[in-house]
Image: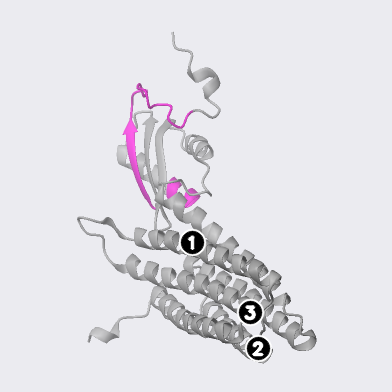
Amino acid sequence: MAHSHPHTPSDNNAKRLLFAFLITAIFMVAEVIGGLLSGSLALLADAGHMLTDAAALLFALLAVHFARRPPNARHTFGLLRLTTLAAFVNAIALVVITILIVWEAIQRFSNPQPIAGWAMLTIAVAGLLANLVSFWILHGGGGEKNLNVRAAALHVLGDLLGSVGAIVAAVVILLTGWTPVDPILSVLVSCLVLRSAWSLLKESVNELLEGAPSAIDIAALKRNLSRSIPEVRNVHHVHIWLVGEKPLMTLHVQVVPPHDHDALLERIHHFLAHEYQIEHATVQMEYQVCHGPDCDLNEHDHAAGHAHHHH
């Protein structure tokens, strides 16, 4: 009886994410072992890159999992923030890994290490195939526009570049025996790692500091709200923040006293949901002009010129 539940898109996403995660994690371990055995720094750098991907896939999985768990009295938003916190810790770990690899690469320029080219090539090619498989898993099957799945697919695509770098280095070493190509490419792959770490750090810090989603321009939102709903005279005390990638909002709206309070409230909610994809907004409607120190909390853009002439 219990097993007859229909498969929702999130189940499907979770399955794809899980497969991709397992493949990536297994090959990350393989690349670390291969890198240590063959003496290749490029393989280790690519393993670092695979770690970013395995982590991204894991957070995506956790987000799907926590999004299903209902909020409780203590955690009224559920536990979605955990994924943000994990992303933050992951980003810092990645920066540390990158620094270690670049440091090691610099050491190797002064005294090159012997590298087992064939072992390196074999593992790099296997890593490339693993990435292709997980990319195919994430991209195939249903066009759900799940942000996490999309992000994970992009990560895996970046990984392909890392594996290609390791393959190029292995081929050059096999053909010419010129070993410095290995640290050179390891530094390039580290730059890829650093780029994904930086965006992860930026997004997770913004979310942890209750920053507004970068896509939303608050001044424009206030102007659009008063333009499209004539009863709205003034919008103030606007706060927008994110919990697990879901935008939340609180705002005070000064309105012309309406005939139907609830219908106007409904129109405001509809506007926010449709124009800005904000499903969860708390609107305080007021009939009097706002007086107080915080009224122009978000007013300092275009109203500043004539708002402060108090008699």
170 with respect to 93 (left or right): right
Residue 122 higher or lower than 93, as above or below: below
Q: Position of residue 29 (x, y in %)?
A: 49, 82
- Quadrant where the N terminus is found in the figure: bottom left
* Mark 1 crowd level (few <14, some 14–19, many ≥20, 10 Å Cα): many
Marks 2 and 3 sit apart, C-alpha to C-alpha, by 17 Å
Which of the colour schemes (rainbow, by chain, secondary structure, one colour) is used? one colour
> Disc 2 or disc 3, which is closer to the eye?
2
Can you see residue 138? Answer: yes
Query: Where residue 91 is drawn, which disc sits there?
Result: 1
User: If you read the primary sequence from the N terminus, does the residue marked by circle 2 or circle 1 appear first?
Assistant: 1
Name the foreground residue: 234 vs 230: 234
User: Within the magenta stretch, is there residue 182?
Assistant: no
Residue 66 higher or lower than 163, as above or below: above
Residue 126 higher or lower than 17, as above or below: below
* Disc 2 and disc 1 in contact, CB within 8 angstroms: no
Tell me the kind of residue under disc 1. Answer: Ala
* Mark 2 crowd level (few <14, some 14–19, many ≥20, 10 Å Cα): some
Q: In the rendered image, which residue does mark 2 sit on?
A: 116
Q: Position of residue 176 (x, y in %)?
A: 80, 85
Which image quadrant for residue 6? bottom left
- Quadrant where the C terminus is found in the figure: top left
Span colored in magenta: 271-299
Callout 3: helix, strand or loop?
helix
33 with respect to 105 (left or right): left
Can you see residue 144? Answer: no
Marks 2 and 1 sit apart, C-alpha to C-alpha, by 31 Å
Tell me the kind of residue under disc 3. Answer: Ser
Which image quadrant for residue 112? bottom right
Name the foreground residue: 302 vs 94: 94
Residue 232 higher or lower than 181, as above or below: above
* Mark 3 crowd level (few <14, some 14–19, many ≥20, 10 Å Cα): many
